[in-house]
Image (cartoon, rainbow, N blue to C red):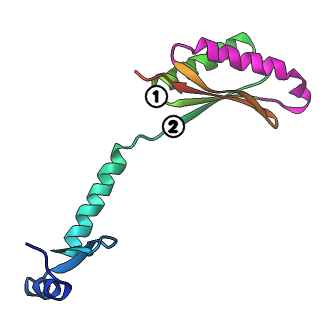
Amino acid sequence: MGVYPLRKALSLAQELELDLVEISPKASPPVCKILEYKKFLYEQKKRDKALKAKTSKIIIKEIRFGPNTDEHDYEFKKKHAEKFLKEGAKLKAFVFFKGRSIVFKEKGQILLLRLAQDLEELGKVEQMPVLEGKKMTIFIAPKKK
């Protein structure tokens, strides 16, 4: 259309039975468009929805161990961890210490490091084992393909 002063733009919008919508208020002079406001809102909502759909959601799966987890249970949980990493989810593996089992901190750390080593080809360690209260946690992220 063109560049018009505010009064002229308002009268032009009223003539066309449309709305004068402020697009960029911080610009000098402010940028406005003559258009149908409801249609503008609809298209803006549609654009936002499309952008939101493109963003990837980070899924975190958890696997819980005890400090004295035996070999069969370890292998079973390791298979689940492999499946989670192949699906593209992050893995949070933790050893939960009940009661006095906190004296087996080293066992828990060895268990988590062993898991990280076994899953080395599928994922990389984001955070080394950290003891927080009664939980020792490790985070493993899937490797990019």
Please give the count of numbered marks on the rendered protein.
2
Most foreground residue, 23 or 91: 23
Question: What percent of the width, then of the height, locates residue 74?
Answer: 68, 16
Q: Residue at x 57, y 17 (%)?
A: 79
Q: Indicate whether 139 appears above or below 34.
A: above
Label 2 residue SS: loop
Question: What percent of the width, then of the height, locates residue 73?
Answer: 69, 16
Task: Identify residue type, mark 1.
Answer: Gly
Q: Indicate whether 50 appears above or below 95.
A: below
Residue 4 falls left or right of residue 42: left
Task: Identify residue type, mark 2.
Answer: Ile
Q: What's the magenta bit mostly, secondary-structure-wise?
A: helix
Residue 8 falls left or right of residue 30: left
Quadrant of image for the C terminus: top left
Magenta part of the chain: 96-122
| Residue 72 picture quarter | top right
Discs 2, 1 touching: Cβ within 8 Å: yes
Quadrant of image for the N terminus: bottom left
Question: On the image, numbered disc 2 is attached to which residue?
Answer: 59
Label ID, residue 30:
none
Mark 2 surroundings within 10 Å by alpha-carbon count, few (fewer than 14), some (14 through 19), many (20 or more): few
Mark 1 surroundings within 10 Å by alpha-carbon count, few (fewer than 14), some (14 through 19), many (20 or more): some
| Residue 127 picture quarter | top right
Question: What percent of the width, then of the height, locates residue 144?
Answer: 43, 23
Q: Residue at x 20, y 84 (%)?
A: 6
Q: Residue at x 18, y 89 (%)?
A: 7
Label ID, residue 88:
1
Q: Indicate whether 71 appears above or below 104.
A: above
Q: Is residue 13 magenta?
A: no
The CA span between labels 2 and 1 is: 8 Å
